[in-house]
Amino acid sequence: MSLQSGRRGRMIWRYLQGTQKSVLLRAAILIAATALIDWRIDLNISFGFLYLLPMLLIGSVSSRSQIIGTALFCTILSDLFDPFPFNVRAALPEDILVFSALTGTGLFAWQLSKNRRQQADNLSRIEAEICARRAAEEQLEFLIESSPAAIVTMTPDGKILLANAAAHHLFGVTPGALPGRTISRYIPALGHVPSAQNAAHQFRTDMQCRGHKDNGDVFLANVFFSTYQTRNGPRLAALIVDVSEELREREESSLQQLLAGARILAAAVSHEVRNVCGAISIVYENLARGSAFHGGKDFEALGSLVQTLNKVASLDLRQSASTLDIGGVDLREVLGDLRIVLEPICQEAGILIGWDIPETVPRVWADRHSLMQVLLNLTKNSERALKNARVKEIQIAVSVNSGVEVRVSDTGPGIASTEHLFQPFQKGAEATGLGLYLSRAFMRFFGGELRHEARARGCCFVIELATAIPRTESYQPAGEYAANTTITAG
């Protein structure tokens, strides 16, 4: 029934369509034709009902007062050309009925036209809003797809709903494969966001954590995420940025600063040694010219200078010890950061790097930053040694016995002579040759050791670390440096 009414309404609307002048012209023609028919055709029938058609036209383009005036004019014409004799008592009710019918028809057309115009205006506004929304969605979609940062949306249980091209590239996944997978596989920390389950605790925040690619590679990520509500329940949106390069630059910069400081220290020591040696030369010349020097002042001065030379020839670590933050360090986390730094560099150099790390490794006594520098120094040495090697491989292995040992080995040419390996200012070493010297100094201060392990092929260094045990007293390094914190050169 409603379908038929709709069809009738559309038919009437098509009949009423047109400009105001054309509609009024059609209405005037119909009124004139109806009056002519009613006047010329001599039948006992009144054709006044035909005025309904022009009233529909008048109502669609005129005001209500104009509709009433036209209805009154048509009623007069109907009375004027009525074939029956005029009788006031009989004609008055008939005129009222005709006038009411014509006025109602005109007002019906007026209301129908008004509703249609309102619907057309509303439809135009809706279409404009739809176009604007579609344009905004297209711009937003283009922004998301072209964004260099990975953008993903997830359900509260971590199931990925949408992911842009950068997210697929970051996680090493083929395009379109991320939706349906869980985010815990790639960013484990996002899989444990408690507020994603509770709509009453919506928030926006950020964090830095480790991420995993589809092939198992690790990277450092800055994650900006927020929760929000939809009709289908709470959702979690995250923007993920790979900041591994920043970590690499920071650690390499720290190593360069460490070596630069060591070179400054070595230059100062060398300057003082030269001054003392010059004084010794002068005293020696004085003694050479004298005949009896036993008990003489020059001889005593020589003894003092020798003692001073012994002091200057050693590096005192007592002042630098206070800057180290020694405590229980998670070795797996340190090696994870090292992996983030090394893998891209090794890939560019064509070096295959292997990791042999147990699932459970006890915490070790060390300064996290200094331990990282020692590991980075050893791997950098291996990288340089493999530059011209036929087989380019670096292996990092961890073993747990009474303590923890970390082996850094490579397939390079090895070391021809290890007699003066950990001494500074070696012949043939790059820069000052202080890298291994300072690395072993740090390890010994932790109560550990850095040593070279002889192998038939390649080169291997072993880092020995003490396991961290909760203590009531402040930690004191064990071994050689527990009583004496000075490291004598050589």
Image: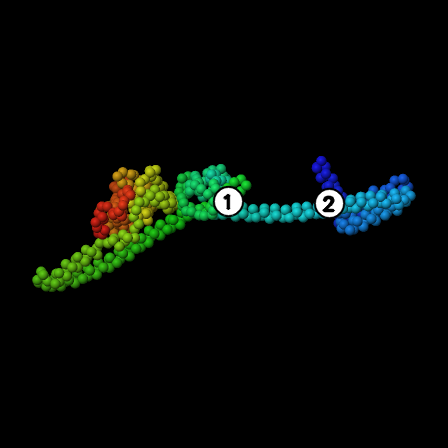
Q: Which mark is residue 181?
A: none
Per the image, the residue denoted by label 2 is: 112
Residue 489 lies left or right of residue 136; in this view the side is left
**Which element is circle 1 on?**
strand
Give the residue at x 83% y 42%: 49
Q: Quadrant of residue 471?
A: top left
- Where is residue 322 drawn, in percent x and y? 28, 53
Can residue 174 be seen here? The reply is no
**Which residue extends farthest front?**
89
- Residue 329 in view: yes
Q: What amino acid is at disc 2? A: Leu
Q: Position of residue 107 (x, y in %)?
A: 76, 46
Looking at marks 2 and 1 on the same chain, the residue that comes earlier in the sequence is marked by: 2
Q: Residue furthest left?
A: 292
Which residue lies most toward the top here?
1
Residue behind mark 1: 228
Residue at image position (34%, 37%) is 359
Screen quadrant of the N terminus: top right
Give me the C-alpha separation between circle 2 and circle 1.
44 Å
- Kindly identify the amino acid type of the residue bearing the numbered disc 1: Tyr
- Residue 475 drawn at (x, y percent): 26, 47
Residue at 78% from the left image edge and 51% from the top image edge? 65
- The residue lying toward the viewer, choosing from 51 and 297, is 51
Rendered location of residue 183, percent (x, y): 45, 40
Q: How is the image coloured?
A: rainbow
Q: Residues within 10 Å of mark 1 (few under 14, many from 20)?
A: some
Numbered disc total: 2
Residue 273 placement, left or right of 110: left
Is residue 42 left or right of 466 when viewed as pictured? right
Foreground residue, 94 or 43? 94
